[in-house]
Image (cartoon, rainbow, N blue to C red):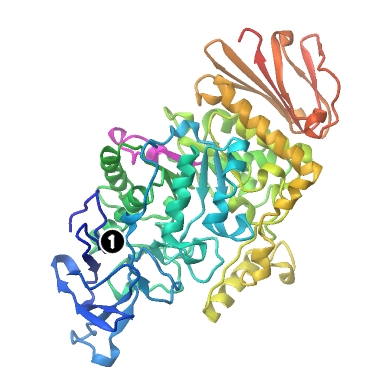
Amino acid sequence: MEINIQERKIGLNFSRAGKAEVWLWAPYAATVSVFLVNKERKFPMLKQDFGYWFLCTNEIAEGDEYDFELAKFSDNGQILVQNERLHRADPAAAYQKQGIAGHSTAINLKSFAWTDESWKGIPIENYIIYELHTGTFSPSGNFESIEEKLDYLLDLGITAIELMPVAQFPGHRNWGYDGVFPFAVQNTYGGPIALQHLVNACHKKGLAVILDVVYNHMGPEGNYFNDFGPYFTDQYHTPWGNAINFDDADCDPVRQYFIENVLMWFRDFHIDALRLDAVHAIKDLSATHILKEIKEYVNKLSEFTGRKHHLIVELDLNDNKFINPVEQGGYAMDAQWIDEFHHALRVTSGQAKTGYYADFNGIEHLAKAFTDAYVYDGQYSPHRKKKFGIEAKGNAGKQFTVFSQNHDQVGNRMLGERTSKLVSFEMLKLLAGAVFCSPYLPLIFMGEEYGEINPFQFFISHGDEKLIAAVREGRKKEFEAFHHEEDTPDPQAETTYNRSKLNWNSLNENKHQLMLNFYTALIKLRKSLTVLATLNRNQLKVDVFKEQNCLILQRWEGRQEVRCVMNFSPQQQVLPMPNGLEYELQLNSAAIEWGGTNNHPLVFIENNITISPESILIFTSSNV
């Protein structure tokens, strides 16, 4: 079946004439029918080439609930008897109104009245990203409540929100990485129409929308893909189960399934960028890697829509093949997350060197992250016990996303402590300064901007008791070396979910308001200074003062120069600042206006400057 970039073919869709057209890939089935639940009617599907089935009818209307009735072949090639026929929801359903255990709901994604016709997106280099989890971002935990906070995000200076996965998952609370219906928008968040409404509202206010999607595995509960066909392969395994079948026998329809999913988010939901989860766990030895093929179709869609659609990958490999252009043998992803910047930053700020942090020595590796993006670009990694990475030569700053916090780095701690519980108020401001002075795309995690102290813990709401017990045991085992078992939060408990919600009342407290004001000023500075807004990795220099745990980052663009002086030590430090009087101070994180104690003008003595403990000074050259 050919992919049509202009309209979705997989699953149930409505034609312009109002007819329902249903496509299903089910090579394991001997017969397939569409069963209308509310009308108790059954419509046989016609068998097509390569294991596809098709139905076109005017008997199905929007809002009808349906599923597929499958008669499967047995091991000896005989059709199963009538009472053993399977009823399964549509694996490409756009809406599971009653959740993963319910029937699919027919919906016309093309019926939404968009008002963002003039929206062409914003350049990726202008992204200032705010990552959020829909369920814990607000008391209501839905898309509508996000809309209520858009003006707040605009005032902060955010240009793009990033939604953690919204594909249908079990129950009503989950990080989203256990989704089993990649095309369906989580019912408890408001469903597909509510998501379209949110994206439309964001575009009206000038905000881009990034959506986190998962193409490396499927969740375990409610996963019936194997009843339809070989969606998975036992040739590879991921940390979360069998790998998606991107290169084994019968992989072509599986590849098309996920390409259709990508196109749907961009075309039918007007999403601006997708963040592809853990692409290092996508196993594909095909001549054309699935990511490269996805990019080819996205480029075709961009030509059709007139909008630029971005692909950002989470990648635990220091391999710029993923972000290099096709003509250089790459997959042409637009950007990647680089955890190493975070790890080096955390160790520099005093985080214990355990686990993967053991690979990082602190200030020297942070300096390398500023200049080279990858810290490990060919050296031996003690944690991985092998040489790791290659140099990121020729890659622009806009191809990397950095952060001092994100959902993984917070939530994968046993207690889900935010950085605000691990470091001082002053260090929080310094960490933010390091991120926003970098030549990369900055990302902040919801609540970070005001120093949220509620944790973000791992939570689920599975219905399978054996699976719940396995998840509980897995979490305890993961952290058995750090705490007693009884300390591990129960991921299934609703209290774990509720304590992970943002406490917006914090903004009534002076300390949190000061932090919010600081972030707002920092982001404004990032936007207003050409040298900071221009993500140029080539015009950058870092001087490291290892014994003092300090560094000075210099960046320049045209006649403008910025010097960012960072002191990660708990003591006041004196650092060289040649020709210091030629620089104008733009921000001092230790100033009283940001909750610090420094109320004195900065003094330069013999080309030296004194900097307060755990603080950052940002200067511009006087000839700007």
Q: Observer-nearest residue: 412 or 302?
A: 302
The answer to whether any part of residue 364 appears in the image is: no
Q: Quadrant of the N terminus?
A: bottom left
Q: Relative to 171, is 306 above or below?
A: above
**Disc 1: which residue:** 254
Q: Observer-nearest residue: 147 or 405?
A: 147
User: What secondary structure is found at the residue carrying circle 1?
Assistant: helix
Q: Position of residue 536 (x, y in %)?
A: 50, 23
Viewed as shown, does residue 409 lie left or right of 293? Answer: right
Viewed as shown, does residue 412 lie left or right of 451? Answer: left
- Residue positioned 45% across, 62% down in the render: 191
Mark 1 Cα shell of 10 Å, populated few (<14), some (14-19), many (≥20):
many
Q: Position of residue 501 (x, y in %)?
A: 66, 58
Instruction: Please report the bounds of the magenta region as a residue range.
Output: 320-337
The amino acid pointed to by label 1 is Val
Viewed as shown, does residue 279 lie left or right of 371? Answer: left
- Residue positioned 33% across, 34% down in the render: 325
Q: Position of residue 3 (x, y in %)?
A: 21, 53
